[in-house]
Amino acid sequence: MSNVYAVIMAGGAGTRFWPASRALRPKQLLPLAGAENETLLAATVRRLSPLVGEDRVVIVTGEHLAEATARAVPGVPASQILREPAPRNTAPCIAWANATIAALDPDAVVMVLPSDHFIGDEPGFQRVLARAVATAERGRVTTIGVVPSRPETGYGYIEVGDPLDPADAAGGAPRAVRRFVEKPDRARAESFVAAGPARYLWNAGMFFFRVRDMAALLERHLPGVASGVARMGDDPARVREVFPTLESVSIDHGVMEKAEGLAVVPGDFGWNDVGSWQSAWELAARDPSGNAAGADDVVIDAKNNLVRSLGSTKKTVALVGVNDLVVVETDDAILVIPRERAQDVRLVVDALKERGRTTLI
């Protein structure tokens, strides 16, 4: 796949995994799932290696995160870490990366992936990626749809159409996209899952296309973004001037929901978007009582807890007689929260902002 490039979107505000994640150390720069010392970003780059080498990886991140990102993935060329001077959502991010790759190879095929997901079955994931790339090479802008495992209200869905090849109706065969569906309420999510993966899949935010096909879609549906990216070129001063003026819009709303002839490749490869400390507990190795704790921690008469000691000086955390908690310790903060309320970590960040405690966020 010598003409295939990967674009990894690596922005992030660093709120859902406070106190481990901060503005300068967001989720993708933390080892939250998988290998103990491998950041989510490094894992994303590594699992692409059978298909795309590091020399053909382009990472888009915030200007303030560029140095930390480069340290996390030292094999990616520094010139291919694009520094956004302001957050403008995924369409400008992808448009800039697409133009950058087009200048390197006008015949390139691009895969766009988030930087902060976990994949349980990496060989299975790589097979689905290869199938999506092959579909994109034939001129179909393609996405991957994850087979739902539950009626999730926090994800968008893809309504699936007929197989692209009527002679190939196997479960993993590329199919037409009927439409993208916004995050549903509980009743609709249940109906989607009941309809089965031949009808509805999760939208995991992965896209595949030839650079010229994406350029044409941007010019048609987001001409202001396309022209702005063209004015930027590769001049850092022009990037700082023009990029913040681009329309802030997602690639889903700005392009994919309007485009025709899209394809989707179904996949079931242990995907998890690692959305909260609850997800981290689900993905962690746990003892027979359901506790995910460090070897030096002490857990007595306790069940289903997550313990993370992440300070520069490791501390022993002891839990006695408590269940279903998340306990996270860093150098300057400690979080204790019920696992079922893991999404409410954002309330802590909001409270710190209100108090002007900016050094903690």
Image (cartoon, rainbow, N blue to C red):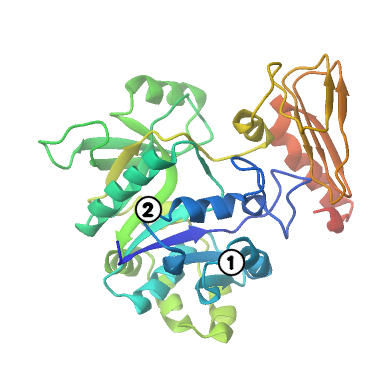
Decide which of tag 2 and tag 1 comes sooner along the chain.
1
Determine which quarter of the picture holds residue 35: top right
Q: Position of residue 41 (x, y in %)?
A: 57, 54
Q: Which one is nearer the viewer's eye here, 152 or 323?
A: 323
Figure quadrant of the N terminus: bottom left
Q: Secondary structure at mark 1?
A: loop
Seen at 64% across and 70% down, the residue is 63
Q: Can residue 114 be seen at all in this image of the molecule?
A: no
Pointer 2: what residue? 207
Left or right of 333? Residue 214 is left
Left or right of 326? Residue 196 is left
- The circle on residue 74 is 1
Seen at 41% across and 80% down, the residue is 230
Determine which quarter of the picture holds residue 284: top right
**How many labels sit on residues?**
2
Q: Position of residue 51 (x, y in %)?
A: 36, 56
Question: CA gap, disc 2 to disc 1?
Answer: 25 Å
Q: Which one is nearer the viewer's eye here, 238 or 63?
A: 63
Q: Secondary structure at mark 2?
A: strand
Compared to 147, does 357 lie above or below?
below
Seen at 75% across and 39% down, the residue is 345
Left or right of 324? Residue 5 is left
Q: Which one is nearer the viewer's eye here, 41 or 287?
A: 287
Q: Position of residue 50 (x, y in %)?
A: 38, 54
Q: Which one is nearer the viewer's eye here, 257 or 171?
A: 171
